[in-house]
């Protein structure tokens, strides 16, 4: 990629995906991300891990950020660089993420007694990608920025 | 319907109640999985196998549902196992801690073998 | 019993570089599956979409790597409509006498336009928007049920 004499290729390529905020559409983001990751040369298990992380991020955006409002969009930006893939998922932020949820690690033993068995999504994202950042999107909603590094 | 159709089937094999999960396990799967589990339990099942398909996916909502099943299994003094999961989701199960409560097998036959050899209690 | 489907839309933007049509293809396929189309129809759509994107990249955008191709999908109770929009450095000019597949196979005309023929055979409707001012807009339509008999030799422009 770096030895092209005739063209100066930009350092990164961006794919943008805008999805309706309805559960089920995370599948589109997952397939887009895995298609891209495979094209970049990521191996099977890293692709699976990215798919699950993207699934969780988009599901959160649909359910919490955009509160299932189908008219609102989830914006997924996939940035291809030489040695890494960056996936950022932004919602329009009806409900901003409680930063306390970001660092919590759920424990199954504690959860068995509770009626709410959930809360695994953010933790899964943290465990499955190389870098993750939970911030505010330029447009004002929640943004999750996930990075996976390409090992050559 | 646009939600992923999860199809749930129930079978009996060698004293084990097998619940086949065909499709993605997400929030929409809750009622189907819970009612299948209820049905086998009311039928007196002591050994329950959740049989997945390789290419389906399970998101965190699905994991929450399965943890709910584990809670019931513990309460009802049953033994639970899972089979058919991809390598990736076997890893997720272990990460989440489900492996402590449900034995993970590669496939159905291995699971039935496993239940047989564990019948000491 | 007639199922009522939600209407939904999705947009995707890719760099105008060969290879990226694969990403668009997979995204649109996932969307169409979600919207209830059969695997067989989705395979047709994948091929048609790839061809349309390649046309947009190669001909519409003339392989300029800094340009974009935008794909918009709209789906309702009756149909799925996909629009492929390039930045139109080269405006598509319809052939004076469009050739049929038989003509092409006989060696008449160039191999360009093969993609359009293929698209026409696979989709229920396909064609360029003649009124587009800002680049080429090519649309593909998939009906939910084949109420109209599909005519394989239908030409597209």
Image: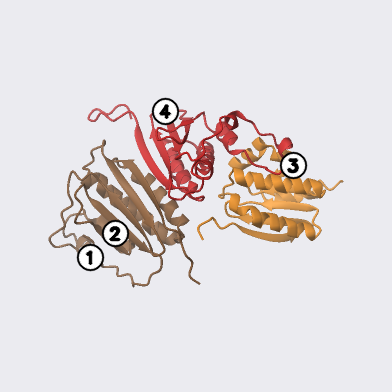
Chain colours: A red, B orange, C brown
Frontmost of labels 4 and 3 is 3
Quickly name the residue at label 2: C118
State the separation of the CA atoms marked 2 and 3. 54 Å
| Secondary structure of the residue carrying numbered label 1 | helix
State the separation of the CA atoms marked 2 and 4. 37 Å
Q: Which mark is residue C102?
A: 1
State the separation of the CA atoms marked 3 and 1. 64 Å
Same subunit: marks 4 and 3: no
Q: Which mark is residue B101?
A: 3
Res A3 → quadrant = top left
Percent position of residue B64, x then y: 65, 44
Tell me the quadrant of the picture where the C terminus of chain C can be found. Answer: bottom left
In terms of sequence position, does the residue under pointer 2 or pointer 1 come before the other?
1
Residue A117 or B62: which is nearer the viewer?
A117
Quickly name the residue at label 4: A83
Q: Is residue A123 above or below residue B6?
A: above
The chain letter under disc 3 is B
Percent position of residue C54, x then y: 28, 48
Instruction: Evaluate whether residue C148 shows in this view.
Output: yes
The chain letter under disc 4 is A
Q: Is residue C93 above or below residue A113?
A: below
For image coordinates 36% across by 45% down, the residue present is: C12
Tally of numbered discs = 4
């Amino acid at each position: 990629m770096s030895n092209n004499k005739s063209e100066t290729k930009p350092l990164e390529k961006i794919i943008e995906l805008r999805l309706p905020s309805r559960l089920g559409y995370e599948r589109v983001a997952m397939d887009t991300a895995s298609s891209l990751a495979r094209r970049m040369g990521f191996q099977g298990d890293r692709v699976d891990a990215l798919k699950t992380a993207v699934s969780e991020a988009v599901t959160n955006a649909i359910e919490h950020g955009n509160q299932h409002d189908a008219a609102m969009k989830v914006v997924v930006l996939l940035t291809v660089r030489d040695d890494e893939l960056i996936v950022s998922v932004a919602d329009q932020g009806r409900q901003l993420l409680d930063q306390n949820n970001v660092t919590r690690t759920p424990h199954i033993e504690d959860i068995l007694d509770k009626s709410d068995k959930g809360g695994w999504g953010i933790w899964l994202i943290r465990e499955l990608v190389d870098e993750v950042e939970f911030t505010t999107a330029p447009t004002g909603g929640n943004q999750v920025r996930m990075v996976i590094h390409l090992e050559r | 319907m646009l939600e992923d159709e999860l199809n749930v089937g129930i079978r009996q094999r060698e004293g084990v109640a097998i619940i086949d999960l065909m499709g993605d396990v997400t929030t929409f799967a809750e009622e189907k999985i819970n009612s299948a589990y209820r049905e086998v339990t009311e039928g007196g099942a002591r050994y329950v196998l959740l049989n997945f398909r390789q290419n389906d996916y399970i998101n965190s909502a699905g994991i929450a549902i399965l943890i709910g099943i584990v809670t019931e299994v513990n309460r009802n003094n049953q033994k639970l196992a899972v089979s058919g999961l991809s390598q990736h989701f076997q890893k997720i199960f272990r990460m989440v801690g489900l492996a402590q409560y449900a034995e993970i097998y590669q496939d159905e036959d291995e699971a039935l073998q496993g239940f047989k050899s564990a019948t000491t209690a | 019993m007639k199922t009522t489907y939600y209407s939904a839309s999705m947009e995707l933007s890719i760099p105008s570089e060969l290879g990226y049509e694969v990403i668009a293809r997979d995204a649109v396929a996932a969307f169409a599956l979600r919207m209830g189309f059969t695997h067989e129809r989705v395979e047709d759509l994948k091929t048609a979409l790839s061809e349309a994107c390649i046309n947009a990249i190669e001909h519409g955008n003339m392989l300029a790597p800094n340009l974009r191709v935008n794909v918009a999908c709209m789906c309702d109770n009756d149909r799925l409509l996909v629009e492929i929009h390039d930045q139109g450095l080269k405006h598509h000019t319809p052939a004076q006498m469009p050739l049929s597949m038989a003509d092409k196979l006989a060696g008449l005309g160039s191999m360009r336009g093969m993609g359009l023929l293929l698209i026409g055979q696979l989709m229920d409707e396909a064609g360029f928007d003649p009124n587009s001012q800002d680049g080429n807009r090519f649309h593909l339509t998939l009906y939910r049920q084949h109420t109209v008999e599909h005519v394989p030799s239908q030409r597209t422009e």
